Each structure stands twice: as C-alpha cells, then as structure tokens.
Image: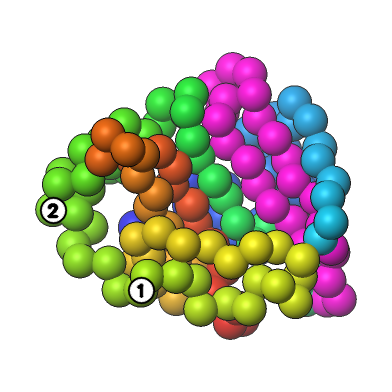
Amino acid sequence: MGKSIDRVQIFDTPAAVERKLGQPTAIAYGDFAGFIYEYNDGRPAGLEVLFLELAEPLQDRAIQITASAPYRGTSKEGVGIGTPKAVARMVLGTPAMPRCPVDWDRFGVRTIYGDIYPFRPSAIVVNYGGDNRIESIRIIWLGEE
C-alpha cells in the first residue's frame, strides 16, 4: 500500500508513465518548477502525475500522483474514489498527520492537507468531500530520497 496508483510510482520518469498509461491528454505548466501529465480519457481518466524539474537525481521524476473522479480504480482493499470515510479509515487506520511535512512552497506548489498515511519515502493523502466520501487520493513524495 502507498506505492502506486495504476502502476505509476513516485520517482517514475515521464517515459515510464507513458509506457504504463499511454500519452497524457494534456500537459499542464504553472507557477512551479515542473509540469503535470493529465489523463482525461479512457481507463486512466481522472489521473494526474506531477513532475518536478529539479537537478539529478530527481530531475523529471514523479513526486505526486493524484486520482479523482472519474477515476474508477481501487486498491486491493477496495478503497477508491467515492468510498465512505468510515470504510477508508477502517482499512487505512487513523491518519498520521494533518498536513504534508514537505515545504512545498520551495517548489511553488501549495501545501497539501488531508488524511496522511506515511509509507516512506512516500505517503497516501486522502481528501473527502462534503458527503464524507473520498474525493481524491494522492501518493506524494515526502521530501526524502
């Protein structure tokens, strides 16, 4: 648990992600040192992969993988988008942190909040909507190599 979403893992290269998911629907650039592969069609619809453009060994490596609607995949335990909070916490346990410990501001990315479950060097971040069902699931790099 906490290693991949749809086989995409933290530190994957853009080429590795494309081999696993195909070409992204779009590539987004913003006010941060990196880019995001967006998948809006087909099986991986609802997935985004954030890459940072840093010096080696992290240059062009995935540091965040996000699943949100309409993504339909689930973990082997059955946790996915739309899972009730009570069920997710029964499977995942009590969250370990209220916010990501990484200083994301240094990369121009806003700090991440949510139920955080560390599986070093990454973590699962679960966000819930107003109906207490999972709205998004992320695997994030915790800033450690």
Q: Is residue 50 magenta?
A: yes
Residue 109 image offset from top left, x and y in percent: 70, 63
Residue 65 image offset from top left, x and y in percent: 57, 50
Q: Nearer the viewer, residue 138 or 119?
A: 138
Q: Is residue 48 magenta?
A: yes
**Disc 1 element:** strand
Q: How is the image coloured?
A: rainbow
Q: CA distance from mark 1 to mark 2?
A: 17 Å
From the viewer's perspective, is residue 68 above or below residue 139? above
User: Earlier along the polypeptide chain: callout 1 or callout 2?
Assistant: 2
Q: Looking at numbered disc 2 in the image, what kind of residue is underneath it?
A: Met
Residue matched to label 1: 97
Q: Looking at numbered disc 1 in the image, what kind of residue is underneath it?
A: Met
From the viewer's perspective, is residue 77 above or below residue 145? above
Residue found 58% across the figure and 77% down from its top: 102
Residue farthest along the front direction in this orientation: 130
Residue found 65% across the figure and 63% down from its top: 110
**Disc 2 element:** helix
